[in-house]
Amino acid sequence: MNNAQNEMLKTAQDLIRKTGKKLNLSQEEIDFLIQPDRVIEVKIPVKMDNGVIKSFIGFRSQHSNVLGPYKGGIRFHPTVSREEVIALSILMTLKCAANNLPLGGGKGGVIVNSEELSEGELEKLSRGYTKAIAPFIGEEIDIPAPDVNTDSKIMLWMLDEYEKTIGRKSPATFTGKPVEAGGSLGRTEATGRGGVIVMENLLKNLNKDYKTIAVQGFGNVGYYFSKIAFEKNYKIVAISDSKGGIYNENGLNPEEVMKIKKETNKVTDFKKGKIISNEKLLELKVDILVPAALENVISQKNANKIKAKVIIEMANSPVTEETYPILEKREIKIVPDILANAGGVIVSYFEWLQNKKNEKWSEEKVNQKLEEKLKESFKEIFEVSSDFKTNLKEAAFISALLKITKKI
């Protein structure tokens, strides 16, 4: 386990402590909120292609189900740890509560470099993990979804294995499935689309006509955020992936950039932009900065170099806790991750509802409901921020904790 994950857990717990004190919660209530209900740790034996049996370690943290079944992704990554899944499950509880979803927080992961596995080994690992956690999940208990290095195909393997294990159909137990297998239309773009919806709500409230955007991270979230913002006539001046970025003050077309990224695996091969580093992208003079890649990229080290007027946190915790006051002093508005990137879990919730009711909503209906839900969350959090005279992040936590503590 690395320090960043320890830090992540500490940050999540400290935020609850800090917010809890503001709400005059008792120490017992705060302790209840920072501890997960349970953490499941499993060993997954996989017969590799060379015939050797290799064991992998997997986790599932179930943080709180006072508002409804646990909900949260499963990630396959070499740095997965017990602390990381606990931290992420806490944030999922708060995200669901802040966005008025009748769900609690869960998170799972397997310690693996999935790029080193063949397709067959990946399938065995996915099925093995599911079998191991099967007694603890279910459509009214815990509903997993894709996360880092997992996708709709993996969800389908997992659902298939789960149904085999329990001996009946249960399509609502996993979300993020392929559309033809019960997945929801609009799910792929949901997180990016949600970010744009929240951004537009903020600009309306601030009465600002900001237009230029820099996006750090060009995976699913960064791509759809920039594509949808571009379609709404915002000017995307910079885009980056893990290998570096490109800048063009006249604007970039995200679809054209993605075409090159798919061909060569890096955005820096796009010829219509000047190559810049990820660090430089964060410091560009733009109206809106969208960190959509890793956590803690905006820290005390670079806080004073940030020139954007608004930051939309599309990654999880891209701005460190200590950096918030520095940016606030400089009047930089930050939309917190638990609101900015909630589109994915909201549409996952819609998928769960569709599966349970055996319905199939049109993409238009999904997008319209997503917009309504985020508008409602934003309005609520914006009002809390005025009432408590605090930033949107703390307001989102206050709003979430108020709902959870009412139910305890």
Image (tube, rainbow, N blue to C red):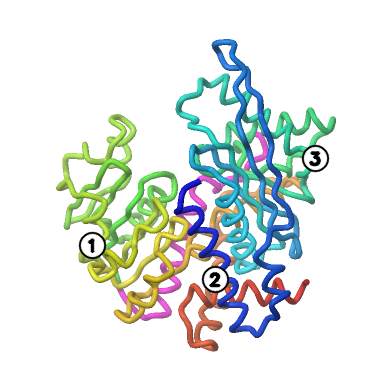
Residue 283 image label: 1
Quick one: label 2, few (<14), some, or many (20+) residues within 10 Å? some
- Residue 335 in view here: yes
Q: CA distance from mark 3 to mark 2?
A: 32 Å
Left or right, 333 with reference to 27: left
Q: Nearer the viewer, mark 3 or mark 2?
A: 2
Stretch of the chain drawn in magenta = 181-209
Q: Nearer the viewer, mark 2 or mark 1?
A: 2
Instruction: In the rendered view, tell whether residue 313 sits above or below residue 275.
Output: below
Label 2 belongs to which residue? 15
In the picture provided, is 395 more to the left or to the right than 273? right
Tell me the tag on residue 98.
none
In x, y percent, where is residue 325? Answer: 38, 77
**Mark closer to the chain start, 3 or 2:** 2
The disc placed on residue 135 is: 3
In the image, 158 versus 297, the foreground residue is 297
Residue 198 on image: x %, y %: 46, 67
Residue 199 colored in magenta in the image? yes
Look at label 3 and name its amino acid.
Pro
Do the CB atoms of the residues marked 2 and 1 lie less than 8 Å apart?
no
Q: Secondary structure at mark 3?
A: helix
Q: Amino acid at mark 2?
A: Leu
Q: Earlier in the sequence, mark 2 or mark 1?
A: 2
